[in-house]
Image: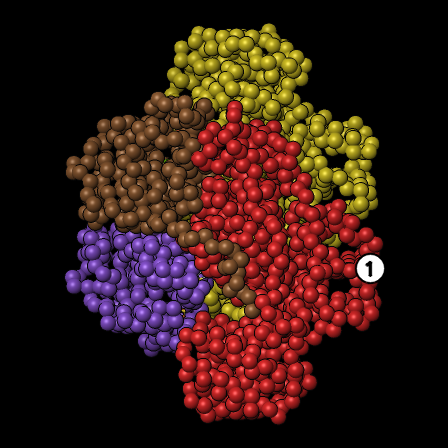
Chain colours: A red, B yellow, C brown, D purple
Amino acid sequence: MNRNQRSAKADQQSLSIAVVGSGGAGAITTGTLLLEAAAKQGCYGILTRTVGPQIRGGEAAALVRVGNAAIDCVGDGFDILLAMDWNNVDRLVAEIPLRADSLIIADPEQGKVPEAILTSGARICELPIGELAKSVSKGRPNMISLGILAELLDLQSSAVNAVLEKQLSKKGEAALQSSMETVQAGRDAASGLGKYPLPVGDAAGGKRWLITGNHASAYGALRAGIRFVAAYPITPATEVLEWLSSGLAKTGGRLVQAEDELASINMVIGASFGGIPSLTATSGPGLSLMIESLGLAVASEIPLVVIDVMRVGPSTGIATKAEQSDLNIAVYGFHGDAPHLVVAPNSVADCVSTTQWAVHLAEAMQVPIIVLTDQYLGQTKSIIDRPSKVDYKAERLTTGIPTGGYARYAITDSGVSPMAIPGTPGGQYTADGLEHSVKGTPSTKAEDHEQQMNKRQQKISNFNYGDHWADVEGTGSLAVLTWGSTTGAIREALRKLKQAGVDDIRLLSLRLITPAQPEKFTAAMTGVERVLIVEQNHSAQLWHFLRAHYELPKDAEVYNRAGPLLFRPGEIIEKIKQWRSA
Amino acid sequence: MNRNQRSAKADQQSLSIAVVGSGGAGAITTGTLLLEAAAKQGCYGILTRTVGPQIRGGEAAALVRVGNAAIDCVGDGFDILLAMDWNNVDRLVAEIPLRADSLIIADPEQGKVPEAILTSGARICELPIGELAKSVSKGRPNMISLGILAELLDLQSSAVNAVLEKQLSKKGEAALQSSMETVQAGRDAASGLGKYPLPVGDAAGGKRWLITGNHASAYGALRAGIRFVAAYPITPATEVLEWLSSGLAKTGGRLVQAEDELASINMVIGASFGGIPSLTATSGPGLSLMIESLGLAVASEIPLVVIDVMRVGPSTGIATKAEQSDLNIAVYGFHGDAPHLVVAPNSVADCVSTTQWAVHLAEAMQVPIIVLTDQYLGQTKSIIDRPSKVDYKAERLTTGIPTGGYARYAITDSGVSPMAIPGTPGGQYTADGLEHSVKGTPSTKAEDHEQQMNKRQQKISNFNYGDHWADVEGTGSLAVLTWGSTTGAIREALRKLKQAGVDDIRLLSLRLITPAQPEKFTAAMTGVERVLIVEQNHSAQLWHFLRAHYELPKDAEVYNRAGPLLFRPGEIIEKIKQWRSA
Amino acid sequence: MSMTAETVNKPTPADYRSGIKPIWCPGCGDYSVLLEITKALATLELRSEEVAIISGIGCSSRIPAYSSCYGFHGVHGRALPVATGLKVARPDLTVIATGGDGDGFSIGGNHFLHACRRNVNITYIVMDNQVYGMTKGQASPTTDPDWDSVLTPGGTGIRAFQPLVIALASGANFVARGFAGDPAGTTNMIIEGIRHPGFSFIQILSPCATFRPDQREWRNMVREAPVPFTNDPSRAANRIMTDDGFNIGILYRGDRPPYETGRKGTPRDIDTIAEEFSV
Amino acid sequence: MSMTAETVNKPTPADYRSGIKPIWCPGCGDYSVLLEITKALATLELRSEEVAIISGIGCSSRIPAYSSCYGFHGVHGRALPVATGLKVARPDLTVIATGGDGDGFSIGGNHFLHACRRNVNITYIVMDNQVYGMTKGQASPTTDPDWDSVLTPGGTGIRAFQPLVIALASGANFVARGFAGDPAGTTNMIIEGIRHPGFSFIQILSPCATFRPDQREWRNMVREAPVPFTNDPSRAANRIMTDDGFNIGILYRGDRPPYETGRKGTPRDIDTIAEEFSV
Ligand SMILES: Cc1ncc(C[n+]2csc(CCOP(=O)(O)OP(=O)(O)O)c2C)c(N)n1
Ligand SMILES: Cc1ncc(C[n+]2csc(CCOP(=O)(O)OP(=O)(O)O)c2C)c(N)n1
Ligand code: SF4
Ligand code: SF4
Ligand SMILES: [Mg+2]
Ligand SMILES: [Mg+2]
């Protein structure tokens, strides 16, 4: 699927605002309300939250970026930093680059602006946020902050009031009234500070969604027909499971909380053996525990979906931050030869359709599939265009009542054999992780092993994946290759370069990681002489994967960096400039 | 280490004998005694056993190959097939290729020679094995069989008697007497059948060992200083653990039987954290379960050794047969970026020194290492030259009593930081799988992550692995690249080709799989224009690994096949001929 | 066995056997257990296509393929989660999990605990031979501490795991101990276990002829439990903790309602659900 | 804290604290447990370098780094095998495993069973808050069946896991239940647990201020167990199975000899051992 339909504007503009404060100060609430109000006014945007290691009460920042067209990455720097206090802000500062023309709003009561912030040379404007809050009965500093930002951004009162009403619907009229007054106090205080007008798109009017990638994946799964989920919580994947818990309840599906990931993957295998499209979601540590049983699903040809919301590794790593470093384990992490699928959405919006596609692929080929997203995609709240309906469904090739000897693992042209679902008379067989004959009977013979290995490989090699295998955008003799969430920053970089007249670079963002598609790749790369591979991990996993499975131009370079600092478009532009002139 | 010191003879000869029979017939005993007697007479040789799926009482074959120089692979065909009966022999027949000039010895009482055997056109000679056994009091058919083979091979009575004495030492004089008589009856019966004289080397006289690869690995580990083992049994790795159980008892070490592999790997981590060199052994399914905690060992920098005795995958696969298909999981099967080591011995004898080296490497770099052997290496009984003493030892860089703030994960030139062993005052720290600062304090900062990732990578990239990284043999513009047990058949093929005047092929057998050694590789491949990669798995894992991590000549071809049928030298020769003329 | 409309006769145990010949050693107790399971299915007149037998890895875990039901021979230790997923997703099926003492109590111990707690309506049959048969004779959790093996010479020194007590303490709803060599009694407890709602656990002493020849003696050691079953778990636990491991019979029948697998909800239109995302 | 020859004064609890500030929420019970552990270590006058504290993952599992002992913060659920390996390899150390109810009884349940059986001389302290704190509020095995969460709305419907009963049924040698808000009592049971040979298990009710504010009530619910400890496991199990979960105190002290970790053998020359391979 070529994604050129995505909303791109000739003059895309965006504005980045960071709201920081220690736990309880409500920085995240301020940011969320800001984003929602901007959405009401027709903006696109994202909110990423970055928090300290504390479970509760630690420092936190809401990083909001709003604009007049789809936003798929963090920006290059922040236009406004609003600090309710400076508590432990040094732990977050690397994520909030400021420029000399940025505006810092700080409460003088909270002490001096920290050195690390001062070095930016940004304009500092002191406002007594705490004081102002106290001036309103039950007023809270985060509502003052919202008011300040609303004023700076020219947010319409109607939009702000609408989100406040929704937010405070359960708290009663008085709370709402107080909040609105507090917001107004903030507006008043900021009236002289100048304007950072919101780059507004068309009014949303039901055409947009506000969604995280985790919810988008969950929704895509449900839409494709997932009706059983086994769950073991893990950051940053838990919300996929939590959303599906209620989603399944509403659709007649079922969710079981498992004792661990060994159990959850095997519950999924059992349910899918029973004919029910099944899924689980996890992150690196959980995926590691599922490896043995994923191999069982390959051998016994049980379709299932595992969503891996990647975080920084190795081991427990950094649970709350993104990295693209589970490519290796997803592709290669099985013992024995175990052909299976790996796909990766490359934007929050894409989480819907790629997960939906993943369910379809798993069921169509009776194979386990791993969907690689990451903490950025999974937990970023994003304003997206309402996803169009795609019709990928869970459709499994099953038997009717077989006449004559049923062979579960029969050799067929496609490599996919009709599967008997328990309950079907005459279809009885034993699914087995031992090597087996076409009937499923355990076998130690070389010929049976070869036959079944060929079948397992061919069914995924021969499948027609259509255009959805990658997003290919642009033409030119240079190409940037990437995958997953890194795609967002590259898209923006290439768009900006194009505006600056550089139009010889194409983008190839791989959605189908394995099996490799060498023919499609060659076609997509026709005319390309040099490639730059961009990825967010320490060992250049994508680059090595591409070397192993594709023919790359000799002139190939990799630009990789471990997490958790996300690539910013400006960095990519810098790198591309340097690379072009090398 | 260049292995050219291995005993190679100008005119290497060998003889292959298969002894088959259903459970209880004692085919394996016949084969074992035959091998041991041949060893006494100065032969080299191997015994591989192939058995049916039954736990006990199924068909079984002892495949013996003896010769006058080191034997590291199964031969091209069998000179003699002795069948005590034909029960289910069709399940084994693919492993016992016969030629028109082979000799089949069969007991007419056991029915007709099966079709699959007849097609070879081999000479059939009927001897009443069962009858003959009954002619001696307490005579057993397997001793008749031993006698027949002793006669055909011109085995000295002194050698046969010596092994019988050892075998029956506990059964008393009468049993020994009866066996010796039965053997004699077998000799008498075979006296007119012609001779297949044993290709005898120098008399062994204590210069040789009779050992399996599993025992060789276990012994190498003990020699290097392993003193703690956690065990969970799995075919075909159990013998490593079993041998170490008694080996550790004799050296003051300790073994714990764990409840599963999740426990065993973590017990190993705990013991190694305590300063004791530690190991476990497993096969594919168990390795899969260890993946998460292997990542922990990488992050927390705990040295440990896992021996993976590979069997046919995926999933449970074929537990009793060899395949080289765990390369991917061993190299790439971790979530996140997790630099670690993988090595692979390439002969039974090499299991000793490579495992010893592995312990040394793990300890020297404070890193987990996976040693990949396979069922063939692990369970083949092999007569080898007594291994020379190499002095790889477990030597860990530890702290004395630190003065001043001790930083467990300090940045050093080598990347290896002195490790405080519990008990050391002032060295207290917390080992952590969370990303951390140099002190081990959990950190979510990008700079700490980058610093620690660099350290983890550099300590293994900068290490000097010496010559032991690969066996490079021969010169020429063609090269065959391989690893592990497949090396044996290739060595033999190349030797035969050389005898036939083909001497432009070099062999490169990779012992250090990861980290890759591109500089050494380039040096070793100077002048090579074409390469053939040979490996025993379905998806060409080594080939893809080499593509990803090395610069191969453009003209590279892969010759791979899934297990369990082992490569035979003749097949390699055929392939090489075809490849050369392509 | 496929029971089409024509099959009107009462099924026989043989109807529940596949044609595959077991790999077991002569004299293995598992032959009897296989027979007892098929007898129970025949007595219950279950349609073989509506029964699924799920196992892990081990000699005993080979059972599914020897039956004519749907079967799943999974990986070592994970029979119970596979069975749980299947039963929750497909409450209409009769789901039986089978396996060995190593599979169930060593590597699979955690699932055992949680399956007992969760109380999904499945029946779990463990063929306990107090040894790892398939890997050729190592100690399992139920092995006596002084049983000698190559891996643990002189014994593990670790006291034997008490499966029935753990089952009771974790909440299993039906607990029984049988002996492979007691076909009538064992068949009956399998029938009752399948009938009983919730998680039913049946430990069957099933001798390993090859690695535990001493277990031939079991025939003379087992006896019917002197008192009938109770529905008081702590009384049942107390009895089992103090017996010698050879009292056989149904020991406990609980009345906890099984895990609620019937949750349906009125299926709502997916588009309606998605409205929550709309700005 | 490194106690050199000069340190002659009795150690204080503060000597066992590292400088690292806990990430816990204000009001979390784990602060108290940390204090109680350091108090116990000070009372026992153990040298901090000869103590190792091993944990898995969870809020409670963060404890090792907050101590001045050797520590290991491993992966989720595997504290006990790490502790076991360490203690077996290094019997000279005092080894304490710590963690949460999710870590210990959900993902780690199997190791809990087998650690109790194996009876290695370590002390296992579980901070039970009946919730997954670190992942922001899901049900754990000890959570009541009707506790509402986003993942399991309306509750899991699964009865709560009974850690102390399972510990007894599997063979733990010392079993106690404490409450974080009872410093004297809890410190004492940690001291006794460390002193007691074999596997000591201490469940400490440790409220989660954030996801289980209802647990503030625990303060008023706990009471000293009405009878002193017993050495009869089935009596102890019976008591616990019938109490309401709020009796605190040392409940059981067994006398099984700990796992024999002292096996030495006279170290033999490796070359001599290898002679068995010689032809
Ligand atoms: C992950 C994994 N670890 C180890 C094994 C090896 N293995 C196969 S069966 C078995 C134990 C079988 O014992 P039990 O469950 O008692 O069955 P039995 O053979 O005695 O009937 C083991 C350890 C495996 N297949 N998978
Ligand atoms: C393999 C794996 N699965 C899941 C997680 C996510 N996880 C981290 S802590 C935790 C549960 C913590 O609960 P508990 O042990 O009770 O500790 P608490 O936070 O309540 O103290 C989970 C599920 C993980 N880190 N690793
Ligand atoms: S090894 Fe034991 S358990 Fe396995 S089949 Fe033989 S007798 Fe039965
Ligand atoms: S979430 Fe609960 S358990 Fe975790 S630190 Fe906060 S109060 Fe403690
Ligand atoms: Mg068993
Ligand atoms: Mg908890």
Q: Which is more toward the observer, B253 or A345?
A: A345
Amino acid type shown at disc 1: Gly
Task: Classify mark 1 as within 8 Å of ligand 2 or not, answering yes or no.
Answer: no
Q: Position of residue A133 (x, y in %)?
A: 47, 89
At a point 78% along the width and 33% down the height, the residue shown is B579
Q: Position of residue B114 (x, y in %)?
A: 57, 14
Q: Position of residue C56 (x, y in %)?
A: 43, 39
Quadrant into which the C terminus of chain A falls: bottom right
Q: Which is more toward the observer, D58 or B319?
A: D58
At a point 49% along the width and 78% down the height, the residue shown is A164
Give left or right: position of B495 versus A414.
right
Rendered position, B157 above or below D81: above
Instruction: Using a 10 Å C-alpha cutoff, classify the residue at mark 1 as few (fewer than 14 neighbours), some (14 to 19) or many (20 or more).
Output: some
Rendered position, A567 above or below B391: below
At a point 47% along the width and 55% down the height, the residue shown is C268
Toward which corner of the image does residue D9 lie, by quadrant? bottom left
Query: Element type at marker 1?
Result: loop
Residue B485 visible to the viewer: no
Q: Residue furthest front?
A: A205
Give left or right: position of D22 versus D46.
right
At a point 39% along the width and 76% down the height, the residue shown is D26
Give left or right: position of A281 versus D263.
right
- Chain letter for mark 1, please: A
Residue that numbered label 1 is attached to: A476
Q: Which is more toward the observer, C248 or B146?
A: C248
Rendered position, A343 above or below B45: below
Give left or right: position of B33 versus A489.
left
Q: Position of residue A183 (x, y in %)?
A: 51, 85
Residue B142 visible to the viewer: yes
